Image (spheres, rainbow, N blue to C red):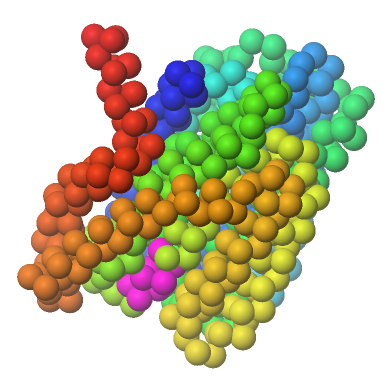
């Protein structure tokens, strides 16, 4: 467990550092660009983001999951990634005018062309990253990701001040990918990495990749679906507003969840390879994450207005009600955040895709049907579908990895009490500070001050396993001293 704990620490440092840079970028960009400008970029980047799920076609997961890696397997992974990623990059360039005409937004053409450049760098980022993940070398991943994020921030802000509007965001993504690629392959070149692609045996990788990428695109589509639907049915202003609400929710959740997500597949795959109880490992991982995520998201839901104002400014007030609903949706999703990882580890990729396709279909129908009711109604649809997704995923895991429903529910119960205690404290703070009228920093400062000690006390009181993990980390740090 010590190696896993160490990996989580390094992964968390990496992700949180990247998230901090992303937070700074979001806060500044939201004050420098208008909702219409951000909405225009959100439409283009959302579509490209979905396509990007296919550009590595499961090669990363394949390299992490395989018991033994040969040079031929690495060459095949690189060859398949180049074929798919470069092919998609060319398709994006060719499709740019058609998408621009569909949305009646001429700037989308150039945005597509700029963002397509990242597809030609992707193979030489994803394959080295898979090596680092396989060996739990998240300290090396931290270096390349931090440098890439920092370069994106510098380029984006510099170009905005130079007057390049939303194009600055696209060039920032390209700068990030180029920086990450150079560091991964020149400074940190992993042992076993090869640069001559091969094409023998790519079918085995593609069989995993098709399902893995399909599931990834369906899950990511859930977050960008409103941008694409509203972009067609409504205005770029509405797209910008919803994307900021979704953006804040995703930032908060990813800050908490992305630190451990890169460790999930190696951890669960290792448990399976060593003959361990995958169901027990999954339950433990889920409970630990829930103890961290649920209290924060519940508080974010109740304090959405001051949070929006602090992050983005008063011009984005209309996004606050959206955050209130979307935060609860993400909380529900986090219950089975590792579901796809465990299904991949158990070679159940087809079931994973079917599950995600059902959820996405419900969400698509709901968003289109709810558009006439306004943006808040769309956010409420997300919450309803979230309840359905939790129920469906629980049943799938019970059927295919033997997850015991009663045991899982009992293990999760302390998370609900911890989140409930934090919610009550937030409501108490609202009795003394008017969230609508007070300067945004006041309620945020008070909540940020009182919540951590309350959260830790509740973890201790309920004998939550997350508290034991903190104690283990502290003991490890003391021994190093």
Q: Considering the image in quadrants, where does the C terminus appear?
A: top left
Q: Which residues are magenta?
A: 319-327
Q: Residue at x 30, y 46 (%)?
A: 462
Where is residue 257 drawn, in percent x and y? 45, 44
Give the tally of numbered discs. 0
Tell me, yes or no, whether the highlighted magenta stretch contains residue 325.
yes
Question: Which is nearer the eye, 155 or 242?
Answer: 242
Report whether 348 appears left or right of 165: right
Is residue 331 visible to the viewer in this orientation of the structure?
Answer: yes
Q: Is residue 84 magenta?
A: no
- The quarter of the displayed image where residue 122 is located: top right
Q: Residue at x 22, y 60 (%)?
A: 310
Question: Is residue 197 toward the left or the right of residue 240 in the image?
Answer: right
Quadrant housing residue 461: top left
Say above or below: 121 vs 472.
below
Report the front residue among 228 and 462: 462
Residue at 43%, 41% (x, y): give it: 288
**Dominant secondary-structure state across the stretch colored magenta:** helix
Q: Residue furthest bottom?
A: 372
* Residue 189 picture location, percent across and down: 59, 15
The x, y position of residue 209, in whole percent, is: 78, 41
Asked if residue 293 shows in the view, the reply is no
Q: Is residue 467 above or below residue 228?
A: above
Query: Where is 213 relative to 44, above or below?
Result: above
Q: Please identify the residue farthest to the left as the structure is shown.
A: 432
Task: Give the x, y percent position of residue 84.
Answer: 79, 41
Residue at (64% x, 47% y) in the render: 403
């Amino acid at each position: 467990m010590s190696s896993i704990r160490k990996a989580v620490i390094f992964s968390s440092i990496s992700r949180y550092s990247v998230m901090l840079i992303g937070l700074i970028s979001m806060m500044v960009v939201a004050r420098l660009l208008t909702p219409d400008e951000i909405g225009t970029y959100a439409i283009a980047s959302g579509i490209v983001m979905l396509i990007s799920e296919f550009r590595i076609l499961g090669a990363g997961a394949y390299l992490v999951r395989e018991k033994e890696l040969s040079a031929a397997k690495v060459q095949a992974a690189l060859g398949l990634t180049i074929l798919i990623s470069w092919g998609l990059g060319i398709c994006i360039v060719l499709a740019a005018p058609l998408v621009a005409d569909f949305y009646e937004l001429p700037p989308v053409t150039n945005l597509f062309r700029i963002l397509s450049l990242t597809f030609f760098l992707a193979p030489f980022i994803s394959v080295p990253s898979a090596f680092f993940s396989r060996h739990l070398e998240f300290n090396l991943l931290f270096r390349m990701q931090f440098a890439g994020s920092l370069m994106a921030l510098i380029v984006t802000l510099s170009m905005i001040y130079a007057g390049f509007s939303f194009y600055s965001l696209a060039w920032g993504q390209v700068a990030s990918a180029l920086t990450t690629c150079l560091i991964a392959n020149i400074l940190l070149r992993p042992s076993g990495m090869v640069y001559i692609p091969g094409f023998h045996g790519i079918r085995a990788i593609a069989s995993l990749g098709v399902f893995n990428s399909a599931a990834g695109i369906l899950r990511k589509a859930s977050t960008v679906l409103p941008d694409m639907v509203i972009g067609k049915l409504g205005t770029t202003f509405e797209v910008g507003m919803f994307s900021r609400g979704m953006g804040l929710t995703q930032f908060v959740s990813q800050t908490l969840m992305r630190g451990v997500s890169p460790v999930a597949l190696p951890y669960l795959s290792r448990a399976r390879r060593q003959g361990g109880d995958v169901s027990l490992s999954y339950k433990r991982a889920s409970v630990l994450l829930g103890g961290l995520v649920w209290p924060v998201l519940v508080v974010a839901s109740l304090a959405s207005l001051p949070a929006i104002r602090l992050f983005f400014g008063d011009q984005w007030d209309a996004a606050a009600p959206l955050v209130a609903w979307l935060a609860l949706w993400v909380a529900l999703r986090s219950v089975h955040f590792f579901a796809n990882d465990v299904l991949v580890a158990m070679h159940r990729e087809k079931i994973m895709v079917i599950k995600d396709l059902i959820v996405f279909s419900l969400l698509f129908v709901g968003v289109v049907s709810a558009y006439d009711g306004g943006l808040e109604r769309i956010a409420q649809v997300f919450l309803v579908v979230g309840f359905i997704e939790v129920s469906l995923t629980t049943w799938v895991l019970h059927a295919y990895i033997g997850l015991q429903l009663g045991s899982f529910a009992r293990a999760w119960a302390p998370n609900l009490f911890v989140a409930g205690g934090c919610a009550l404290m937030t409501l108490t703070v609202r009795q003394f500070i008017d969230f609508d009228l007070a300067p945004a920093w006041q309620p945020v400062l008070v909540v940020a001050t009182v919540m951590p000690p309350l959260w830790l006390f509740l973890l201790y009181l309920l004998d939550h396993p997350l508290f034991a993990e903190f104690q283990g980390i502290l003991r490890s740090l003391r021994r190093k001293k």
